[in-house]
Image (tube, rainbow, N blue to C red):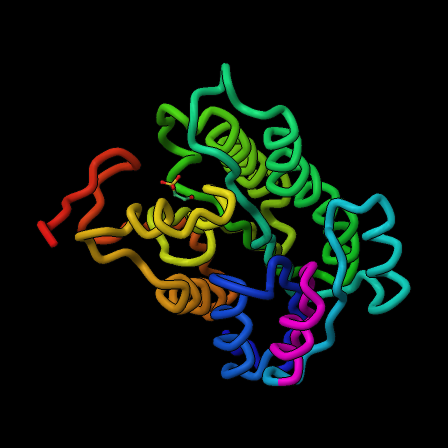
Amino acid sequence: MTLLGKKILLTGASSGIGEALALALFDKGASLFLVARRADRLQALAQKTSANYLAMDITQPDFVSELEKKFGLHFDGLINNAGLALGRGPYSTSLLSDSERMLQVNVEAAFRLTHALLPKMLEQGGGDILNLCSIAGHWTYPGGAIYCATKHALWAFTKALREETCGKNLRVMQISPGMVESEFSEVRFKGDKDKAREVYQGMTPLSPADIARMIVFMLEQPRHVCIDELITMPTDQGSPTTVARRNT
Ligand code: 8X3
C-alpha cells in the first residue's frame, strides 16, 4: 500500500522514534501532522518534512479540541507514539507524580485521541491505528511496575479494538520494541546521562531508525494484510532483564 498523500497524525514527534518516523514517512510521501510539546524542535522537523504541526502536551484537557480546530479529526492514520517511563526503582518508594504522568501520557491521552479519531475513520471507510507498545507490555520487571502496567493496558486496548473493528477496513496494529537508544533512558533517569548511557553499555541497541523502518513496513503492507503486532529486540537482548554485554 502506498503512503503517498496519506494524512497521518503522529504524536511524540519531536525526538527519538517519533522524529525518525516523521522523516521516514516524509520520504514515502505521507502528508504529516506532527504533535509534540517542544515547539522549537517540532517546528524544525516540520520544516524538514513539510508537515503541519501542533506544539502541545497531549494530556491537556483541551488537546483534542485544539487539534480539531487546527486540522479537523479526519486522518487516514493515527500513530500513538508519545510515551515515557519515569523512574526505575521499587514502587514502594516511587513518586506518585511519576505514576500519574506515565498513566496520563501512555494510556489516557492515547485512549482519548483514539476515541476522537476512530469514529471519523469508520465514517470515511477505513484507516490505520498504530500504537507504540513495548516488550514491557509482555513482560514485567522489578522497577517497572507502572511503566509495564501502562504498556500492558495499551496492549490490551489495541487487541480489543482490533477485534471490535474487524470487517471495517481498519487496521489496528502495534509494535513492541525492546531497547531502543533514544532519549527514553535519559527521561527515565531524570536527566542522569551516565545512568542512561549504562543501559546500553557493551551491547548494540536498536535505533529509532530501525523502528521507523519496521513501522513503514507495517503500514506499506497491502490493505488486506494487518500485522497485528511486531515484537522486536536487539539481537543482544532476550527479555527486559536478559541482556548480553561485551566487556568494554
Ligand atoms: C522500553 C523497553 O525493556 O526498557 O519500552 O521496558 S524496556
The quarter of the picture showing ligand 1: top left
Looking at the picture, does residue 186 appear above or below residue 148?
below
24 or 217, which is in the foreground?
24
x%, y% of residue 40? 68, 72
Residue extending furthest toward the top: 92
Q: Is residue 167 magenta?
A: no
Drawn side of residue 225 relative to residue 76, left or right: left
| Any part of residue 228 in sight | no
In the rendered image, the quadrant that contains the C terminus is bottom left
Drawn side of residue 146 relative to residue 212, left or right: right
Number of on-image labels: 0
116 or 206, which is in the foreground?
206
| Any part of residue 240 in sight | yes
x%, y% of residue 101? 65, 36
User: Which residue does the image show at 29% across and 47% down from the upper left?
Assistant: 198
Residue extending furthest toward the left: 247
User: Which residue does the image show at 87% across and 49% down from the upper left?
Assistant: 62
153 or 83, which is in the foreground?
83
User: Which residue does the image show at 63% across and 79% down from the upper left?
Assistant: 44
x%, y% of residue 113? 73, 49
Residue extent of the magenta highlight? 31-47
7 or 87, which is in the foreground?
87
Looking at the picture, does residue 186 appear above or below residue 87?
below
x%, y% of residue 93? 50, 18
User: Which residue does the image show at 67% across and 63% down from the upper left?
Assistant: 38
Drawn side of residue 37 relative to residue 190, left or right: right
